[in-house]
Image: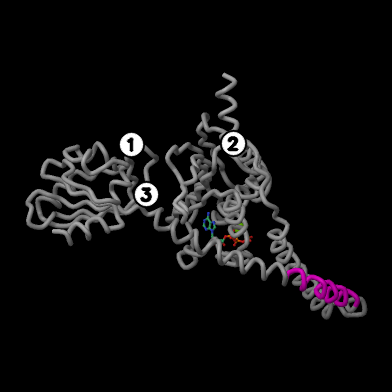
């Protein structure tokens, strides 16, 4: 029994045992965290009051129970009544030896992505960017020499040969452009943290996107009007949103598509750090597009520098995004399937302001 308990409570996935009436018989430690309540207080509660699933499961669930067969459900939103629903996969199985009892595993999809991404982004980005910055600086001078020489050469050449020198000049320009993008990282200063109206940032980004790279897109606002001020650097956050809008516009292709800018407040969202301190990041900003989704072969690495799925992409956009977000001590995640790609930014709230407002009123 001792061993069973150890296995049960070591399971890193929220797990619930349901009795034949769908009441909670017991939950493991991970589920206590997930539901934010203890096994003791939840015992006997109807499970569907605590775990809200945005998908009609009843028939399939009853069939699994009646036929003693497991049931797998992917990609459903699971809410607990206290926080915004999480994207989860569910595994359901009849509990062996206990007729009518069911075992219910809930695997939040985002959590897995979050944990692994955070680590790789920071370390890989740091070393690669430092190196690239140095190179960028060193390459620009000789490149200017090469371009100049090609231009001089071209003066005495026939039209046919001039094509070749033109090619040298053109390609050199492309390299310079790339190097300048790399240097953006070097120029990136630490954010000046102020109270920022996220909706103003989104509006600015939206307007400039519609005038330029996103002219073929429809950009819808889906704002929570009561969203409080964020703590951040408005100009840097604008860069973040512009990069995300640009990627979505590019992914959509010439035919265009729709981007939804969604904001909402998620009171309980915290970033858990290795030191155990949780920093609240309650402001959520989602940039949702209906394009083809991330190319599967690079989906896990898109925040790394120089990872690009586009022919002329440098792969620096999202690396810059992740640098800025991590300087803000914020968080960014992505979930993507064809037809729905969601980049979600989680930002800190400007608490000084709120406190002052409270005092004033
Ligand atoms: N909304 C999206 N839909 C589909 N794929 C995306 C989306 N956003 C990013 N990607 C993929 O991630 C890759 C990396 O994006 P990132 O912005 O870092 O680089 P890039 O756009 O290729 O180049 P750069 O931004 O430097 O011009 C893109 O090339 C694209 O394949
Ligand atoms: Mg990009």
Secondary structure under tag 2 reads helix
* Residue positioned 59% across, 36% down in the render: 199
Residue sitting at 47 percent across and 36 percent down? Answer: 265
Residue 325 is situated, as x and y percent measured from the top left of the image, at: 58, 51
* Number of the label disc, if any, that sits on residue 81: 1
Name the residue nearer the viewer: 278 or 337: 278
Magenta stretch?
136-152
Q: Are marks 1 and 3 in contact (CB under 8 Å)?
A: no
**Number of dots carrying numbers:** 3
The answer to which quarter of the image holds residue 51 is: top left
Q: Is residue 95 magenta?
A: no
For label 3, the residue is 87
Label 1 vs label 2: CA separation?
A: 26 Å
Q: Is residue 360 above or below residue 355?
A: above
Quadrant of ligand 1 in image: bottom right
Indicate if the residue with disc 3 has its beta carbon within 8 Å of ligand 1.
no
Majority SS type along the magenta span: helix
Q: Residues within 10 Å of mark 3 (few under 14, many from 20)?
A: some
- Residue 327 in percent (x, y) is at 61, 52
Q: Is residue 160 above or below residue 309?
A: below
Which mark sits nearer the N-terminus, 1 or 3?
A: 1
Say which quarter of the image contains residue 308.
Answer: bottom right
**What is the quadrant of the N terminus in the image?**
bottom left
Label 3 vs 2, first from the N-terminus: 3
Extreme residue toward the top, this view: 361
Sequence order check: which comes first, mark 1 or mark 2?
Answer: 1
Q: Going by the image, does 261 lie left or right of 194?
A: left
Does residue 311 sit above or below 234 in this rendering? below
Q: Residue at coordinates 60% horizontally, 40% vertically from top-left? A: 231
């Amino acid at each position: 029994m001792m061993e069973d308990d150890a296995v049960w409570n070591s399971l890193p996935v929220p797990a619930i045992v349901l009795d034949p009436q769908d009441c909670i018989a017991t939950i493991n430690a991970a589920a206590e965290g997930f539901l934010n309540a203890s096994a003791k207080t939840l015992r006997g509660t109807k499970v569907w009051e605590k775990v809200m699933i945005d998908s009609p499961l009843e028939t399939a669930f009853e069939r699994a129970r009646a036929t003693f067969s497991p049931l797998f459900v992917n990609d459903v939103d699971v809410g607990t009544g206290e926080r915004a629903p999480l994207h989860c996969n569910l595994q359901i199985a009849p509990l062996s030896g206990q007729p009518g009892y069911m075992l219910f595993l809930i695997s939040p999809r985002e959590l897995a992505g979050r944990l692994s991404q955070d680590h790789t982004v920071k370390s890989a980005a740091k070393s690669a960017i430092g190196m690239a910055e140095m190179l960028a600086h060193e390459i620009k001078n000789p490149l200017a020499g090469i371009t100049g020489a090609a231009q001089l050469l071209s003066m005495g050449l026939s039209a046919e040969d001039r094509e070749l020198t033109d090619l040298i000049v053109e390609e050199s320009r492309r390299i310079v452009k790339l190097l300048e993008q790399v240097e953006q990282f070097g120029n990136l200063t630490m954010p000046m943290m102020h109270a920022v109206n996220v909706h103003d940032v989104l509006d600015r980004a939206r307007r400039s996107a519609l005038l330029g790279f996103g002219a073929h897109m429809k950009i819808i606002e889906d704002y929570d009007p009561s969203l409080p001020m964020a703590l951040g650097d408005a100009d840097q956050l604008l860069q973040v949103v512009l990069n995300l809008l640009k990627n979505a516009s590019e992914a959509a292709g010439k035919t265009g598509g729709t981007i939804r800018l969604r904001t909402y407040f998620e009171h309980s969202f915290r970033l858990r750090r290795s030191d155990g301190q949780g920093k609240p990041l309650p402001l959520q900003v989602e940039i949702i597009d209906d394009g083809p989704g991330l190319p599967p072969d690079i989906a896990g690495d898109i925040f790394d520098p120089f990872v690009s799925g586009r022919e002329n992409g440098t792969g620096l956009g999202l690396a810059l995004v992740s640098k800025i977000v991590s300087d803000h001590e914020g968080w960014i995640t992505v979930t993507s399937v064809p037809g729905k790609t969601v980049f979600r930014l989680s930002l800190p709230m400007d608490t000084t302001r709120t406190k002052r407002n409270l005092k004033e009123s």
